[in-house]
Image: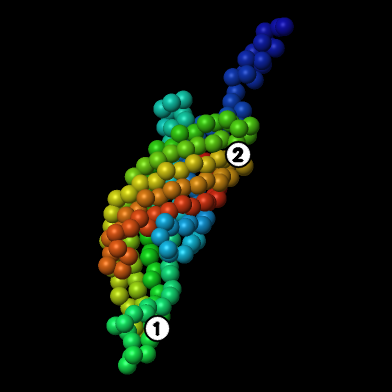
Amino acid sequence: MNAHALLAFAALTAAPSPSSKAKEEPFFLAPKVGFIKTTTSLSGDLYLAGEVGYLTPLLKRRLALVLEVNYHRPSRSGTLRGPQLDNLGQPVERPYTLAEREVALQLSAVFRFPRALGPLTPYAGAGPGLYLHRATVEAFETTASESSGALGFQVLAGAELPLGPGGAFVEAHYHFAPVDFLTTGDVNVGGVLAAVGYRLRL
């Protein structure tokens, strides 16, 4: 092998492939959509979220820090009935609707297992969150609302499939989001959710 061939071989092996370059991008962002069911009697609801993240150089670039903002608004409808509502001994039923709006800001540490399942990269994480709640009750032709914020946490797990300049993913979460309203009592309005999205490398 002559000197020109050796130089060409060295340049070829030293040049990063397109796939390896994509893996080195440290920042990413992702929209998410899914379904969440709280631990209460509130109905399931559409879950909308967006995340920004940074793949740190720690643990062989497997540890990511992720900031997520999400929103959902589960509700419940029914009728109120009791002796205090009776009219001259006749039972009276009054319809009501309770809606609990939640906006959450969550910071999670996520550990990734690159290509641990063939082309798939599974991951798992956990972290604290600030949960902002607003409960609205419509009953007796009036509307009443309560608002508060509380700290909670989430745990998550998912898997990502490389696709284009990023990856498509599916993941599951559990949220612990305490709230103490007159209309709800002291309960956890967090719950379990499943979501899909696309994580774009920047």
- Looking at the image, can residue 165 be seen? no
Q: State the SS at label 1.
A: loop
Q: Classify residue 132 by image quadrant.
A: bottom left
Instruction: State the image coordinates of residue 120 (x, y, percent, origin top left).
Output: 60, 36
Q: Residue at x 37, y 90 (%)?
A: 90
- Where in the figure is residue 10, as x and y percent of width and height? 62, 15
Give me the C-alpha separation between circle 2 and circle 1. Answer: 55 Å
Q: Relative to the observer, which residue lies in front, 42 or 123?
A: 42
**Placement of 96 over or under 48, stated as above or below:** below
- Residue 44 in the image: x percent, y percent? 48, 62
Drawn side of residue 85 relative to residue 111, left or right: left
Specify the label residue 128 is tagged with.
none
Does 133 sit above or below residue 52?
Answer: below
- Of badges 2 and 1, the one in the foreground is 1
- List the residue tagged with mark 2: 162
Q: Is residue 194 left or right of residue 127?
A: right
Q: Earlier in the sequence, mark 2 or mark 1?
A: 1
Q: Residues within 10 Å of mark 1 (few under 14, many from 20)?
A: few
Residue 180 in sight from this viewpoint: yes
Amino acid identity at mark 2: Pro
Q: Which residue is mark 1?
A: 93
SS at circle 2: strand
Number of marks drawn: 2
Q: Residue at 43% across / 32% down in the picture?
A: 63
Report the residue at 52% width, 51% height from top. Answer: 194
Q: Residue at x 35, y 46 (%)?
A: 153
**Mark 1 belongs to which amino acid?**
Glu
Q: Is residue 190 above or below residue 94?
A: above
On the image, the x and y values in percent for residue 129 come to 34, 48
Q: Which residue is more in the foreground, 66 or 102?
A: 102
